[in-house]
Image: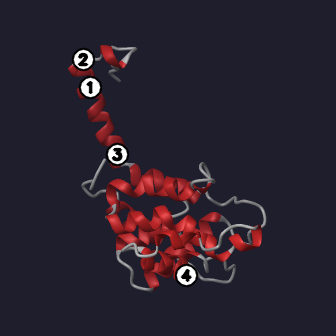
């Protein structure tokens, strides 16, 4: 395989960057496959939950699908906690960063803020502010984020819920991540 000639980016030639650009385009095209592979590995979880992170994600996405959400929101529901493994203190922002080039403003905002909105269900038990989400009252996507949390996310820890398998969501993930990016 041909490689670049530089060891410092500032010394790269046009040919070097054209080569890298060609490889990057192929790499970007396989993003959906890498995401699905990563998701399939979420079978271990933080101790104490009754289900693993993959099952939580599948339940959330299945609920979105059952409620006839659009494909973009179904993928967002599936990936909303993808950051839990590597960024547990800012998992929502991590998930939003993964989705950002491919989803609209509303979907992005819901994913990015869902962690704060979820605090409504537990923060008061830990001497925190359960109404953390109130600082967003009046925002155009406030109610949508409340609904995302209430109807799909917070109730998706049920060991008896019959979620769809990850394979069922692969076409949605591939479709969303094959879009021309909204932004980069």
Tag 3 and tag 1, C-beta contact below 8 Å:
no
Name the image quarter holding the N terminus. Answer: top left
Q: Between residue 66 and residue 142, name the one nearer to us.
A: 142
Residue receiving disc 3: 28
Tag 1 and tag 2, C-beta contact below 8 Å:
yes
User: Around disc 1, counting alpha carbons within 10 Å, would you say few (fewer than 14), some (14 to 19), or many (20 or more)?
Assistant: few
In the image, residue 155 sits, relative to residue 27, either above or below, namely below
Residues under labels 1 and 2: Cα distance?
A: 6 Å
- Tell me which numbered mark, 4 or 2, is placed earlier along the sequence: 2
Residues under labels 3 and 1: Cα distance?
A: 16 Å
Tag 4 and tag 3, C-beta contact below 8 Å:
no
Which residue sits at x=50%, y=55%?
Answer: 93
Give the secondary structure at mark 2: loop
Which residue sits at x=46%, y=79%?
Answer: 64
Quarter of image, res 88: bottom right
Residue receiving disc 1: 17
On screen, residue 103 versus residue 76, left or right, reads left
Nearer mark to the viewer, of 2 and 3 = 2
Q: Between residue 90 and residue 171, name the one nearer to us.
A: 90
Nearer mark to the viewer, of 4 and 3 = 4
Residue receiving disc 2: 13
In the image, residue 149 sits, relative to residue 54, either above or below, namely below
Residue receiving disc 4: 150
Which residue sits at x=47%, y=54%?
Answer: 35
- Tell me which numbered mark, 1 or 4, is placed earlier along the sequence: 1
């Amino acid at each position: 395989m041909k490689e670049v000639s530089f060891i410092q980016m500032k010394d790269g030639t046009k040919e070097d960057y054209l080569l890298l650009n060609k490889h990057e385009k192929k790499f970007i095209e396989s993003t959906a496959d890498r995401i699905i592979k990563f998701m399939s590995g979420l079978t271990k979880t933080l101790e104490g939950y009754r289900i693993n992170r993959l099952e939580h994600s599948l339940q959330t996405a299945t609920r979105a699908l059952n409620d006839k959400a659009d494909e973009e929101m179904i993928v967002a529901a599936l990936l909303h906690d993808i950051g839990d493994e590597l960024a547990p203190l800012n998992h929502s922002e991590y998930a939003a960063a993964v989705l950002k080039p491919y989803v609209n403003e509303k979907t992005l905002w819901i994913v990015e803020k869902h962690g704060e909105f979820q605090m409504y269900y537990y923060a008061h038990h830990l001497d925190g502010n359960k109404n953390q989400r109130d600082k967003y009252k009046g925002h155009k996507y406030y109610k949508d984020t409340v609904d995302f949390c209430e109807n799909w996310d917070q109730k998706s820890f049920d060991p008896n819920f019959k979620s769809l398998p990850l394979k069922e969501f692969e076409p949605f993930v591939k479709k969303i991540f094959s879009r021309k990016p909204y932004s980069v």
